[in-house]
Image (spheres, helix red, strand yellow):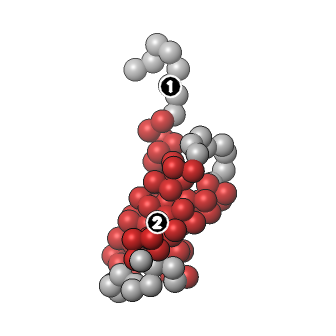
Amino acid sequence: MTVLAWIVLGLVAGLIAKAIYPGRQGGGVMATLVLGMLGAVVGGWAGRLLTGMPAAGAPLSFASVAWSVVGALVVLFFHGLASRKRPAGKV
């Protein structure tokens, strides 16, 4: 049951992050799910680092969703930097 809750959290966090982040991002449901799950990991790590609190037992709590969305926004930002098209002829 916990794995399913983290998958749902990842999907929710990815959808919220894509809605908040300016511009158009490619990718479908699977990309959103992966983005959200990576965001949940990054956000959970950042939340524990900044607050000193252990990981929450309930993955669908407000705090875990908020940290996951923040993490997904960070992941989305770096994904945009990595996948940005560069002009031809430039190194």
In the depicted view, which residue is nearer to us: 72 or 8?
Answer: 8
Q: Looking at this rendering, what residue extends furthest in the front direction? A: 1
The residue singled out by tag 2 in the image is 7
Q: Secondary structure at mark 1?
A: loop
Q: Residues within 10 Å of mark 2 (few under 14, many from 20)?
A: some
Q: Find residue 6 and report its image quarter.
A: bottom left
Task: Locate residue 17, reporting x and y percent.
Answer: 59, 59
What type is the residue that disc 1 sits on?
A: Arg
Quarter of the view holding residue 48: bottom left
- Tally of marks: 2
**Quadrant housing the N terminus:** bottom left
Q: Is residue 15 left or right of residue 43?
A: right
Q: Is residue 27 above or below residue 18?
A: above
What amino acid is found at the position of numbered circle 2 in the picture? Answer: Ile
Q: Label 1, on which residue?
A: 86
Q: Are marks 2 and 1 in contact (CB under 8 Å)?
A: no
Apparent side of residue 3 relative to residue 68 in the rendered image (left or right) = left
Residue shown at 40% from the left, 20% from the top: 91
Give the x, y percent position of residue 49.
33, 76
Q: Is residue 41 above or below residue 90?
A: below
Residue 51 visible in the picture: yes
Dot 1 alpha-carbon crowd within 10 angstroms: few under 14, some 14 to 19, many 20 or more: few
What percent of the width, then of the height, locates residue 90? Answer: 45, 18
Res. 71 visible in picture: no
Q: Is residue 25 left or right of residue 57?
A: right
Sooner in the amino-acid sequence: mark 2 or mark 1 = 2
